[in-house]
Image: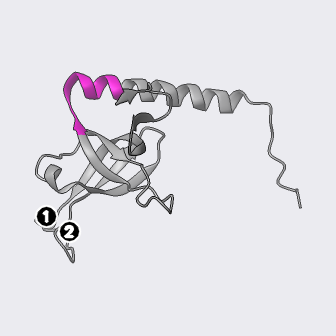
């Protein structure tokens, strides 16, 4: 495996293809044992504030279900769910805590601020009258 840096995604290359991961922060863990959550199955989900300010609710890998908690920084698998259809998996596969979580989150936060300031400074004005 080769780490290609923290451009806007974390990329891991392997013989199986390209795997993409987005970091996010857990806002709420959704489990059936919570008195305010009812589900048709035993899957665990989490509402996530993504590094780019998007909000998502995604699944949690079963092995992480009892470990995940609010405030965790997590990596979400954005690799293709199917090889023939480019739909992202969108499932939490890693939990980051401590210094690792702080460093990863800080880096993405800085990237997002840079990206936002570039958009604000851009002289391009969208033309919504194009037919």
Look at the image and tell me whether residue 71 can be seen.
Answer: no
Please tell me which residue is depicted at 20% across the width and 31% down the height of the picture. Answer: 97
Please tell me whether residue 107 belongs to the stretch shown in magenta: no
List the single residue furthest toward the front. Answer: 15
Please tell me which residue is depicted at 22% across the width and 54% down the height of the picture. Answer: 61
Q: Name the residue under label 1.
A: 34
Crowding at mark 1 (Cα within 10 Å: few <14, some 14-19, many 20+): few
Task: Work out whether 40 lies above or below 34.
Answer: below
In this picture the colour scheme is: one colour
* Numbered circle sitting on residue 66: none
The quarter of the picture where residue 114 lies is top right
Along the viewing direction, whichever of 50 and 8 lies nearer the viewer: 8
Q: What kind of element bears circle 2?
A: loop
Q: Give the alpha-carbon distance from disc 2 to disc 1, as whole Å.
A: 5 Å
Residue 57: x, y in percent? 35, 57
Is 79 displayed left or right of 8 in the figure?
left
Residue 44: x, y in percent? 21, 61
Asked whether the beta carbons under mark 2 and mark 1 sit within 8 Å of each other, the answer is yes
Marks counted in the figure total: 2
Residue interval drawn in magenta: 95-105
Q: Mark 2 points at which residue?
A: 37
Quadrant in which the N terminus is drawn: top left
Quadrant in which the C terminus is drawn: bottom right
Residue 104: x, y in percent? 34, 27
Please tell me which residue is depicted at 18% across the width and 46% down the height of the picture. Answer: 69
Please tell me which residue is depicted at 38% across the width and 24% down the height of the picture. Answer: 106
Is 51 displayed left or right of 58 in the figure?
right
Residue 65: x, y in percent? 15, 53
Along the viewing direction, whichever of 2 and 74 lies nearer the viewer: 2
């Amino acid at each position: 495996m080769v780490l290609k840096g923290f451009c806007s995604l974390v990329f891991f290359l392997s013989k199986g293809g390209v795997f993409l991961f987005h970091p996010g922060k857990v806002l709420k863990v959704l489990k059936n044992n919570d008195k305010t959550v009812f589900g048709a199955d035993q899957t665990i989900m989490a509402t996530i504030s993504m590094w780019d300010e998007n909000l998502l609710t995604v699944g949690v890998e079963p092995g992480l279900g009892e470990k995940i908690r609010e405030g965790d920084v997590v990596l979400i698998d954005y690799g293709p769910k199917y090889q023939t259809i480019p739909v992202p998996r969108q499932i939490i596969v890693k939990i980051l805590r401590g210094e690792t979580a702080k460093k990863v989150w800080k880096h993405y936060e800085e990237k997002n601020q840079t990206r936002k300031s570039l958009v604000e400074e851009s002289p391009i004005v969208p033309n919504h009258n194009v037919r």
